[in-house]
Image (cartoon, grey):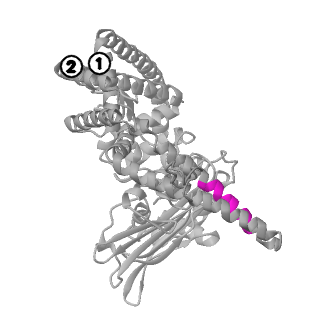
Amino acid sequence: MLSELSVDNLAIVERARLEPARGFTALSGETGAGKSLLVGALTLLVGARADPEAIRAGAARARVEGRFQLEPGPAHDRAAALLALWGVDFEGGEVVIRREIAREGKSRAWINQTPVTIAALAELGRVLLDVHGQHEHQSLLVADRQRDVLDRWAGLDDVRAACSAAWEAWRDAGAERTRFNAEEERAAIEADAWAFAYEELQRAELKPGEDDELASRLARLRHAGRLTQALARARTAIAGAESGDGGPGDTTGRPDAGALHDAAEAERALREAALVDPVLAALADELASARVTLAEVLRAVDDALDPEALDPAEAEAAEARHALIERLTRKHHRALPELIAWRDELGARLARAADSDSQRVRLAEAERAARAALDQAARELTRRRKAAARRLEPALATELSVLGLAQATLTIALDPVDSIGGAPGPAGAERVEFRIAPNAGEDARPLAKIASGGELSRVMLALKTLLAEQDGVDALLFDEVDAGIGGAVARAVGERLAALGRVRQVLCVTHLPVIAAQAERQFKVAKVEQGGRTLATVERVEGEARVAELARMLAGDVASPTTRRQAEELLALGTPLRAPKKRAPGRAG
């Protein structure tokens, strides 16, 4: 519900503040006093186009701010989803919308202090407020919206969801068949090339990471001589070299001292020294550890010196394998990982091509089955919609008669949708359009083409009265709903607005006291002159002030004791309707 509206520097409104009731609030005032400015301010909050000419003379900018308090329910959930999508904070169910219009033509908007686009305002506005009486922001004038209204009123959400799911399944089946046909056509053209490339890659028996492994092996094999010499020097340095020549002067055949031998000698010396100074035992232990490490390095060097690891035949084979991989990657313009993936893809293509006839039959049958399921779901939805339309039409006729449109005929037309192949869409096989003939003998026309704002507002009021529980909009604003009516019809309009206020917040701009008297709260818009300038003021009228305002609405500026008594009687008659009622769960207003 709209809990507060504040307006600054909009046309003749310098500053105004409005706190509507949770149920039915009436806005009254003389013609030209500025009531339409409040309606315009509200439409700005829900995405209406801003006009810099509407800024009050002498002001740099105009500002409109609205506070909406959403209780748990459909409107709350839809608003929460939108705000979460936009990254806007939403705590405590409160939505604060601010709109500013600058003199230079720039318009800015915020939701809960987060800047947003005007398009975002319009989308959120469809949840917060429905405006009736002008040909803007009227969701029921949109054909798709009329279809939604009929479906919700009839409780067709599940049937419609089934139709949408069937449509998606049919669409996916058709897309899969289309992809298959495209691949098949391509395969027919390129099958020989694919087969040749696949056979070539299969024979190559490529393995992931093989190119990097080959590069490492080749670097070793190509420099085998240099590698062997370096490893031999390393081995000599670690283990020592055989220096005995077998002559009479050298019968031991002992090796020249190497690092491993020297480390052993040093360890023995330190062990001997530790007998005198035990602290040196730790150094001996460290040398023992170093000897273990040297021995491990020696074993690794011996493995690297293995003649088989440096076999020239292996080098020749590795060179040939490396050349093959390089040739294939250059030829097909793909690195090795991409080449392996392409090989597998070619294999899958060729397998599908070999099974193309049976696959084509399977896909066609799947699409036919999906289309049959869609047709069946759409037929059921159409049947239920037709039945719902037959029930809704007389109910609307009754409401319109009470609202002074007894000669009006409202019909709900279900027209087939135009689609490729005559297939139903995700929302079914028909468009839904509400059409009305306001007077006997006239042709029924779409709601959007009704010329009279008063007629249109009463049609909307009738629809809203019947659809109050199903409609997900939080608040309703009616303007011109009392145009061209009076007496019993005006009272009926007021009663409908009051009844609607039990499940929704309702704001109504009215000139008729019999309607205003039935509101839970009433505001008076007046035009005054102050400091040589014209101002529009907005004030809540209660008690004697409200009686006086209703008397003015009855008799103008010449209100008499008689008109005051009539005003009091109207208020007394309206009291039962304004008494607090138990509201539907989760409904604001």
Q: Main structural element of the magenta stretch: helix, strand or loop?
A: helix
Percent across and percent down for residue 229 are 39, 52
Residue furthest out toward the left:
189
Label 1 crowd bin: few (<14), some (14–19), many (20+), radius 10 Å:
some
Q: Earlier in the sequence, mark 2 or mark 1?
A: 2
Q: Left or right: 197 with respect to 111?
A: left
Relative depth, front residue between 392 and 150? 150
Percent across and percent down for residue 440 are 33, 33
- Split into 4 quadrants, where in the image is the N terminus? bottom right
Can you say whether 11 is above or below 360 in the image?
below
Q: Which residue is drawn at 34% across and 51% down?
A: 135
Which residues are drawn in magenta? Answer: 283-294
284 part of magenta stretch: yes
Amino acid type at image mark 1: Leu
Disc 2 + disc 1, Cβ < 8 Å: yes
Amino acid type at image mark 2: Ala
Relative depth, front residue between 17 and 554? 17
Q: Check disc 1 and report the residue beneath it.
A: 350
Can you say whether 50 is above or below 311 in the image?
below
Percent across and percent down for residue 318 are 32, 35
- In the picture, the disc for residue 191 is 2
Q: Which residue is drawn at 56% across and 50% down?
A: 253
Can you say whether 400 is above or below 81 in the image?
above
